[in-house]
Amino acid sequence: MNTMILDAGNAAPAATGQVEQDTVETNIKVSETVGQPLCKDAKLSMRNVNVFYGETQAIHDVSLDIGRNEVVAMIGPSGCGKSTFLRCINRMNDTIESCRVEGDLTLDGEPIYGPKVDVVPLRARVGMVFQKPNPFPKTIYENVAYGPKIHGIASRRAELDEIVENSLRRAGLWDEVKDRLDKPGTGLSGGQQQRLCIARAIAVSPEVILMDEPCSALDPIATARIEELIDELRKNYTIAIVTHSMQQAARVSQRTAYFHLGHLVEVNDTETVFTNPQHELTEAYITGRFG
Amino acid sequence: MQTPTLFALLLLLVLVAYGTGFSRALAAARSRGGMRNLAALPTYYGTHTALWCGLPALILLGAWLAFDDPIIRSLVMGAIEDKPDTIAGRDLLYSQIQNLAAGNLFGEPSAQVKAAAERLTSLQAAASTLQTIIVLVLSLGLGAFTLLRFSPEVRAREKVEKVLRGVLVTCASAAILTTVGILLSVLFESLRFFQSVPVTEFLFGLHWSPQMALRADQVGSSGAFGAVPLFTGTLMVSAIAMFVAVPVGLMSAIYLAEYASNRVRSLAKPVIEILAGVPTVVYGFFAALTVAPFVREVATSIGLQASSESALAAGLVMGVMIIPFVSSLSDDVINAVPQSLRDGALGLGSTHSETVRKVVIPAALPGIVGGVLLAVSRAIGETMIVVMAAGLAANLTANPLESVTTVTVQIVTLLVGDQEFDSPKTLAAFALGLMLFLSTLVLNFIALHVVKKYREQYD
């Protein structure tokens, strides 16, 4: 499936002498990016995304697909726009007044932006885990039950209990907190808090989970647990993860996207990116010459 | 020398001392090859000299001014042979002597008074000369001593900073000591009051009528000091005020913090805070002249009895007065809720209002409660509005359309005009003041505690 795109992409540079690709299906230009930004059975597809903060452009013409049950890692130096791009997917950028997003973004072929789109169900389908663990100042139980409650997923207490237990189990936190579900979530350790936030996101049964540097505030052991968890979650969810740790990207993802100054420079199989990068900027970054 | 002149001279000496210390340090720096070889900057040497020159002399001058009058008086009075027996009589005699010494003649003074007045004049002159000499000698002596001891090794900065720290501590304790002083004076006067009126009667009595008979033949004014009607009146007016202020203030805070655009917020917030700057007396006549008649008209038109001064009118206006207090504090607290919590809630698919209701407000609640408690203590202590709009009659009632009176209003009425300071009527004001002081103190204590606890959660 990807070969088709790749072939088309390789044909273009041959003709123009530039790194440029055309998609087969939609015939939309994918500027600059080398590798395989697109895939056939895409859960999420983003085309020609531009993001502006007031006058400043933060994302330049980025096109990227994220396939079903795939983990895509986004790496790049600080300020390269990877978090901004991630926040476009569940429209978290709406909360920033000066932010403007252009381009075609679709989830299962349905548009994410547009006057008719209700952002609330969208965010229920696309969950998010943030850089800093941000449990609500409520009990552990209430933290996980929050989402199901506001979306009316569980009608009876027993159902809610089951959702909470399942979510905590999947987040690998159940055994640690099952005896103190009525204690405040803010009293947990950093790693536990982050897993609580993951459980909270899972509880609304989203289809996609966005993770914005989920381990940057955690120690190596807590990080390892979350990485295992991401691998586990891949069976049921589509995951996009922003990370500063290249080892983490290598461990958890199937494809890796390298961002540089708001441009998507290269997207390839994770193994390819880390062993045989096609773009010189990618190579410079992963070999540690900057970043 | 007159004290102001002496003071000016002292100031001049201090300036000279500063300049001398400063230039000595500069000269020492030059001869040693640079400022780095001094233990402190020249300004510190200047200040060090100036402090030694001025501060002890100033303290002595203050002590002198505080104690010389009583000492002179005891010397003068001690020389008089046949003194009056009463304190009042002796006071009268001494003021007669003082008047004569100052040149104010009232009638023909006795020989004894004349002699005492002469003695007073001479003592005062001697004291003034002595004061001038001692202060100047102390100032010059210590200043010169400091200059003599000058060396580049003197750690002038540390010494100056030690003195400055002392000054800061003094200033900080001034407020605390004043509060303690007020509390003690109110406490002792209250104890005097409770000697004539039992505490139980004051706290649990249902009848308040503080008029006392001044002469034995007056009838019907034996005085009753049951403060319960005042407490209920205060509670009712404050409750009405909070009923207005809390919802309106809280909702305006939520609007400003969560929904308003930056432009609206930058306009609306100062405007709301202007409400806090309106003098309470203006609110008072607004309540008495506009709101109270309006309340009565509305009540009569729906067939209710209402007096022209009512708890409702005072409470409503007081509520409006407190709105900016509640909204400003709540706004700060809501803004302090971390954005990450809002992001977390929005990221789970909450609507904006769900985020506010279920995450932001619960997170900010302790701080909001603290702000509301502070507002309650303001409402309880508020005087002007209730004096003008709530009335003076101490009715024990639960009907907000009747006129009630509050603790603060009664304190005002008890102390306005000529008073005997040993009658229970006047002393009752202190007992009421003590109650007020204690209740607002407890409320403030709880409020600050709650606010502090909230801060710890996010810092």
Image (cartoon, rainbow, N blue to C red):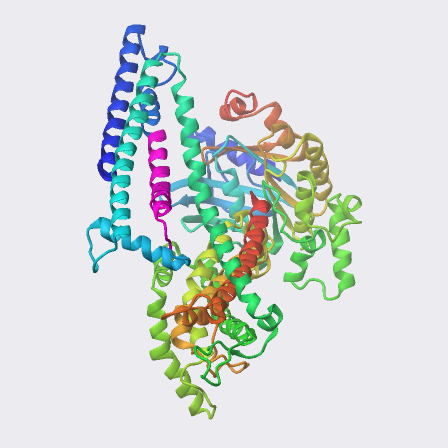
Q: Looking at the rendering, in which quadrant would you find the N terminus of chain B?
A: top left
Picture coordinates of residue B43, whole percent (x, y): 31, 22
Q: Position of residue A53 (x, y in %)?
A: 40, 44
Compared with A274, B372 (above or below) is below
Foreground: B96 or B413? B96
A247 inside magenta stretch: no
Side (left or right) of B302 relative to B128:
right
Using the image, determine if residue A143 lies above or below residue A284.
below
Residue A194: x %, y % from top left: 66, 42
Q: Residue at x 23, y 52 (%)?
A: B100
Horizontal arrangement in the rendering, residue B357 relative to residue A198 (left or right): left
Q: Nearer the viewer, residue B310 or B69?
A: B69
Q: Residue at x 21, y 58 (%)?
A: B108
- Callout count: 0
Query: Can residue A232 be spotted in the picture?
Result: yes
Q: Camera-side residue: B373 or B29? A: B29
The answer to whether residue A109 is seen in the rendering is: no
Quadrant of residue B269 within the rendered picture: bottom left
Give the quarter of the figure containing the C terminus of chain B. Answer: top right
Closer to us: B275 or A284: B275
Q: Main secondary structure of the magenta part?
A: helix
Q: Is residue B66 magenta?
A: yes
- View extreme (bottom): residue: B303
| Residue interval drawn in magenta | B55-83
Taking the spot 28% from the left edge, 55% from the top edge, the residue there is B96
